[in-house]
Each structure stands twice: as C-alpha cells, then as structure tokens.
Amino acid sequence: MEVLDNIPIQLDLAKVLKKLRQRNRNEEIEKSIQELIEIARPIARPKAIYEVSYVDNKSEDSVDIGGIRFTSRVLRINLDKVERVFPYVVTCGRELDEINIPSSELMKSYLLDQVKETVLTLARKYFEDYLKEKYALGRMSRMVPGSLEDWPVTQQEALFSIFGNIEDLIGVRLTDKCLMLPIKSSSGLYFPTEIRFESCQLCPRESCIGRRAPYDPGLAEKYWDIAL
C-alpha cells in the first residue's frame, strides 16, 4: 500500500472554466473563480492511496481482490484475464472542504464545488500517470462502485476494507449510505486492458453530466450474454 499525500497540481482559471463548460464568457463568474483559486491554491493537498492487489477465486458473478469478495458480473468479465489490479481512493482533500462560503452565496458555493472537482480531476490524472510509469502499464480502464446497477455503491465498504483506516491515512470516510466525504473524492479499481472500458458504455441513463462515453447497447448485451 502506498499513500500519495501531497499530489502536485497546476490549478488555474482555464482548467476550472473547462470543467464548467460555459458557452459564453462571464467576467463576474471568472472573477469569482479566480478569487476562489487564490484561496484554494495555497492550501490544496489532494491525496491518493492505492494497493497492488491480485485477483483470485473467479466465479460467474464475483471475484476476490486482495482476499476481499466483490460481486459484479461486469467486473468479473473485465478481470477475466487480469491477475493484478490497483484499488484506489483519490480525494481533493479535507483542506478545501474547510473553506467557508456563506449559505446565502449559492453561486459562489457552486463555483467552489467546481474548483474542488477540478482539483480532483487533476489529482486523478496525476495518479493515473504515476501508476503507468511506476508499473510500466499500457492502456488502463477503471470501474467505480455505484457507476452501474451491477456493481452497487454498497461495494464501497469492501473496497475501503482493503486499506484499513482510510480516514487516518488520507482523510476520506464513508457515510452510512456509502458516500465519500469529502464529496470530491473518487474510488475504484484500475486494471490493465487492451480495449478501454467505461461503465458509461453499459448505462442507458440519458442527460448524465458525468458521462465519459456513449451508451453502447450492443456491448451491454454482450456483457449479459457472455457465458463464463
């Protein structure tokens, strides 16, 4: 297990605006974002924790990872020819969560969320590159508990159990509904793959702001029809 407790990032206005996906420029919003960046930049300490784990005991719809049982047909199929995976948690850090925005300033609170989301995105990208370089990995894909009905968010508990007390290590904890705090955190499994996989390809939900790939009904059908 390794902890990366001060991931270097370059936080700037352009990156936050890209996350916002604004069609037209708004000087007032840009000014507010820049003010928040100036507050966030000196205190931001995004962190990550990961483990090198091995896959075992594959059944029809479950698999053991690091001795922990995970139940998901899609995960099982994706790991069919995989022996080594990388469970992880990445977070923007509690430091940014401690920035106090008055409840009456809804827009500023929303913009701070976008700043924190940008920090998380940059930290996860750094972490991906770190894994690829350290372990000489080529193409990687990832799966996230809760991204598919087949792998529900309750599997976060199993994932977190791989690491022990994550709150002491990087400041992330699970709520009783298996949501992470700080909210701007990401967890899941990275695994080597020849063809990139995104859970979005199997999810028909429309108008999802987090969609990273279009729904592929043909691919979805193959997952449910594969005979293991």
Image (cartoon, grey):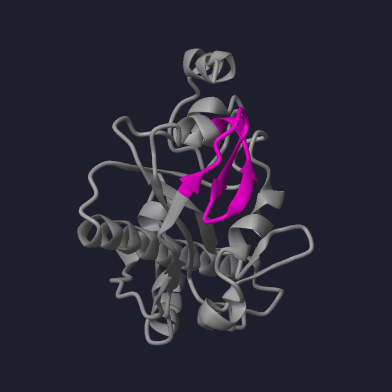
- As rendered, which of 44 and 193 lies closer to the eye? 193
Coordinates of residue 106 in the picture (x, y in percent): 65, 67
Coordinates of residue 92 in the picture (x, y in percent): 48, 71
Q: Is residue 106 above or below residue 57?
A: below
Coordinates of residue 9 in the picture (x, y in percent): 31, 72
For the C terminus, the image quarter is: top right
* Residues rendered magenta in the picture: 55-74
Which residue sits at x=39%, y=39%? 82
For the N terminus, the image quarter is: bottom left
Residue 99 shows in this picture: no
Coordinates of residue 4 in the picture (x, y in percent): 38, 75
- As rendered, which of 55 and 174 lies closer to the eye? 55
Which residue sits at x=57%, y=13%? 225
Left or right of 5? Residue 162 is: right
Magenta stretch holds residue 198: no
The part of the image, by quadrant, that contains residue 38 is bottom left
Residue 206 shows in this picture: yes
- As rendered, which of 128 and 54 lies closer to the eye? 54
Which residue sits at x=63%, y=48%? 69
Q: How many marks?
A: 0
The part of the image, by quadrant, that contains residue 105 is bottom right
Which residue sits at x=62%, y=31%? 61
